[in-house]
Image: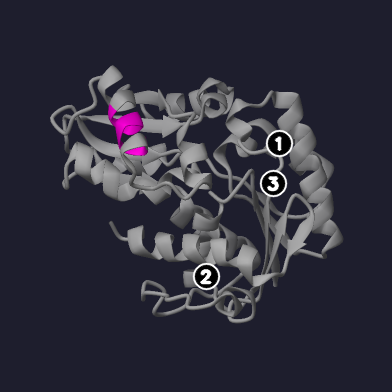
Amino acid sequence: MRIGIFDSGIGGLSVLNEAYHRFPDEEYIFYADTRHVPYGLKTEEEIKGFTDEIVKFLIGKKVDAIVIACNTATSVSVEMLREKYDLPILGMEPAVKPAVENAEDCDKRILVMATPVTIREKKLANLLMRVDVKHRADLLAMPELVGFAEREDYESDAVKNYIRKQFSEIGATEEKYSTLVLGCTHFNYFKPLYREILGEKMLLVDGNYGTVHHLGDVLGLNIKKDADSKIIFNQPQDIVVGYHTSYYESGDEITDNNRLSKYLRMLNRLEFVRNI
């Protein structure tokens, strides 16, 4: 199967990386719309236009299914895209349902981080209304975190101070919250900082696992038996040839090792934080 995965930037690599673990023998096209990142600060019409062009591009590459590896793009565009195109288009949403289920026996609250667009869209409000019947979830916009991820700035004082500031404004502590929902694929890169600030016992939940499993169900794929074993990416050829992947940035194929090395570093970062 040939699977297209796209995001506004490199956040969607966390979904691709999960797919590598579950379905390593499939063929992938990863599309980062770096020309327009971040989507979380764009208008709805702009996002719909960007995603429509990307889906057209991926269909032109003969993909069998498309994963929108972006909560913001999903919330704005997925229904429009499904109505317009006749192939499986999977979206992402903040993993509120598993967070609520995992916290059923706990009296602490749930903190859902997302982009401003995702937070203001009706899709998230409807999800919360459906699954958060006890109204335990609080929402927190983290607009600048996407930029830190794109710059590979994972642990500097600047990003630490930003996260601390955002958390402090709503009184986010380990005494108040038991679960942190990472409602943007860019947010996975910073797991060690969430642990440092909110404590080691904080449960971190994202939508990658559920999305990739749903992809397998839709396409009838068999999950690799040792899917949780660690992957080590040593050189760009590991992620291009070894994992059957073509990389594109806003329509331009990335083939030189210097640019592919950024994806290599980011995938290795995701391996480092995967089970934190």
Q: Residue at x 76, y 25 (%)?
A: 45
Compared across the picture, whether 117 is left or right of 94 comes to: right
Q: Which labelled disc corresponds to residue 33?
A: 3
Q: Mark 1 = which residue?
A: 79
Q: Mark 2 = which residue?
A: 20
Q: How crowded is mark 1: few (under 14 residues within 10 Å), some or many (20 or more)?
A: few
Q: Where is residue 177 in the image (x, y as percent from the top left)?
A: 21, 31
In the image, is residue 176 above or below residue 99?
above
Q: Which amino acid does label 1 sit on?
A: Glu
- Residue at the farthest left position: 175
**Image: magenta residue range:** 159-164
Q: In front here: 151 or 228? A: 151
Could you tell me how far apart the alpha carbons at marks 2 and 1 are, in whole angstroms? 27 Å
Compared across the picture, whether 87 is left or right of 189 comes to: right
* Chief SS of the magenta region: helix
Tag 2 secondary structure: helix
Q: Which residue is drawn at 54% across and 57% down?
A: 13
Q: Where is residue 31 in the image (x, y as percent from the top left)?
A: 69, 55
Compared across the picture, whether 259 is left or right of 274 comes to: right
Is any atom of residue 131 visible in this view? no
User: How many numbered discs, if any?
Assistant: 3
Is any atom of residue 151 visible in this view? yes
Mark 2 or mark 1: which comes first in sequence? 2
Mark 3 or mark 2: which comes first in sequence? 2
Quadrant of the image containing the N terminus: bottom right
Q: Residues within 10 Å of mark 3 (few under 14, many from 20)?
A: many
Tag 3 secondary structure: loop
Comparing marks 3 and 1, which lies closer to the viewer?
A: 3
Q: In front here: 25 or 116? A: 116
